[in-house]
Image: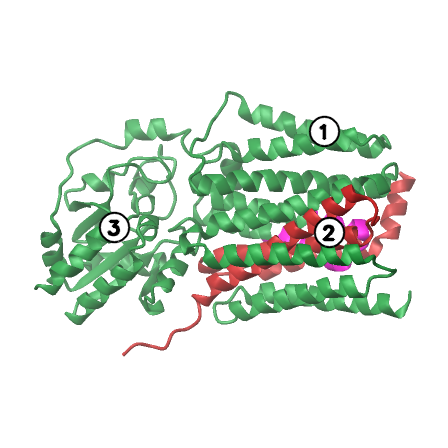
Amino acid sequence: MNDVLAFISAHINLFYILILMIFVGVEVINSVPSVLHTPLMSGANAIHGVVIIGAIIVLLNADPNNYVELILGFLAVILGTLNVVGGFVVTDRMLEMFKKKPAKK
Amino acid sequence: MNNTAIILDVIYLVGSVTFITGLKMMGKPDTARRGNSYAAFGMTLAILGTIFLHDGPIAPIIYGMLFGAFAIGGIIGWMVAKKVKMTAMPQLVSLFNGMGGACAALISIMEFHAHAGDMKTIMMVMAGLIIGSISFSGSMIAFAKLNGNLNSNPRIPFYNIINALILLITLGVGAYITLGNITDFMWPCIDLALALLYGIMFVLPIGGADMPVVISLLNSFTGLAAASGGFLYHNKVMLTGGILVGSAGTILTIAMCKGMNRTLFSVVFGAFGAGSAAAEAGGASGGSIKDISVSDAAVLMNYSKKVVIVPGYGLAVAQAQHVMHELEALLEERGVDVKYAIHPVAGRMPGHMNVLMAESNVDYSKLREMEDINPEFENTDVVFIVGANDVVNPAAKTNPASPIYGMPILEVERAKNIIVNKRSMAAGYAGIDNELFYNPKTSMLFGDAKKVVTELVAELKTM
């Protein structure tokens, strides 16, 4: 129990972010036309690629002489990069279609 | 706190703001593309900040590996995302989602030793491990299903109970590791295997038609996995991005379910197909179908005042969008009013069809959403259905036993003539029969969509 309380007090600002972001997420997505659901999902997919930050931290903190750590960290960064780059590029390709075309005569 | 750390924090703050505004802007067609660029910019900033404002020395080998990994992941990701056909978008999103999940799981595996025994942080390590692994293996199954590599929806008896059991054991082992201060590396490996198994079992029985919902759900899972990393590293940008996606993804999942008139519960626990036996018994009364030749169809459309085209996934698969646009232009030239009726879930995901049609330069104003076009069918001469099936199935309104009962549909049966182009009499994605084909007003035009529409165009040109 004390451990849990200590954890909460050590991370209290993170808990505030957690709660507030839940509301922001709901608010941002609400009342979006269904036409945009696919690109939106793809965009959200790219944003959770932020997990790459964790992969970078792991690799930066890895022991340069520990090859297992290095290789796993290397893999993690590759996977994260795939998520980020692929996610944003695919979303961009989809949204490119939604730009307004000049009206035809 | 030294200055570099403060600057890094500010960078993370900017990153978080770009994620929120970016996602907000993606909710409107005009600003959507810019919103995506904002978020991408924020992400780049956060990544660069993490590397160059890192506290402490970095060995050259690590720099090398870091940028090597960026190059490999970046080039592959870029190429795949640029090359893939628009029809294959949904599985691609699933694939990239799986990569994020795997990344989160790998981070947790690597962090286990450093945190083993510390209950407060190991809890977050285990959360990232379990959620990330489920998201990874689930996304891979969803990818294989949408890609057509995996078609069966096996339903072993009591599968709901078995799945619940696997999930319970997975969580149980996670709790055991957390509360029991376990330091043996074997245990997280066991839990990893269990979570991967659960991801597979979770998605495997779900039918293809529900896959977008599942991908969206797994998408928010990966968000949560990223957020657990935020707690682990006390990293606010990971937390913001992760929770934002977790929460927005959940709302999006529910919105998608509503579009298909399904509940999340029925998607996850009872897939399509369970009720289809009853539907077949009640719905398809058999009856005869009527063929129409290409030239008759061309004549019919040529002398119509109003034609509504209902494009489905079959049209996109046959890559017939461009020639369809040609047909539409040709008819318009002859004074026929042509519209496209887009069902919200036409294609493989909500909005997918709009993307596909826009790709072939179809005028945005010709694409009509379901609520707008339904009242217009009354005075439509010809409805031309190309590669669509379930979205025009009247069983959704008339047959309570049908698995798609209650789903809003395009009410094409109110038009004067209905021409259906299909490759064969095979059932649609939901795997159910369509009584529309037996309607006396309906004529069937069998053949590959691209071939048929090309022939129609050629025929029209001779008139």
Q: Amino acid at mark 3?
A: Ala
Which of the pair B447/B302 is nearer the observer?
Answer: B447
According to the picture, the residue beneath numbered tag 1 turns out to be B190
Rendered colour, chain B: green
Secondary structure state at the residue bearing disc 3 = helix
User: Where is residue A91 shown, x and y percent of the image?
Assistant: 52, 60
Question: Label 2: few (<14), some or many (≥20) within 10 Å?
Answer: many
* Chain to which the residue tagged by mark 3 belongs: B
According to the picture, the residue beneath numbered tag 3 turns out to be B449
Q: Which residues are drawn in magenta?
A: B225-248
Taking the image as drawn, is residue B330 in sight? yes
Q: Are marks 3 and 1 in contact (CB under 8 Å)?
A: no
Which of the pair B273/B125 is nearer the observer?
Answer: B125
Kindly identify which numbered label has been placed on residue A55: 2
Kindly identify which numbered label has been placed on residue B364: none
Rendered colour, chain A: red
Mark 3 or 2: the one toward you: 2
Question: Label 3: few (<14), some or many (≥20) within 10 Å?
Answer: many
* Chain to which the residue tagged by mark 1 belongs: B
Please indicate whether residue B235 sits to the left or right of residue B338 in the image: right
Q: Are marks 1 and 2 in contact (CB under 8 Å)?
A: no
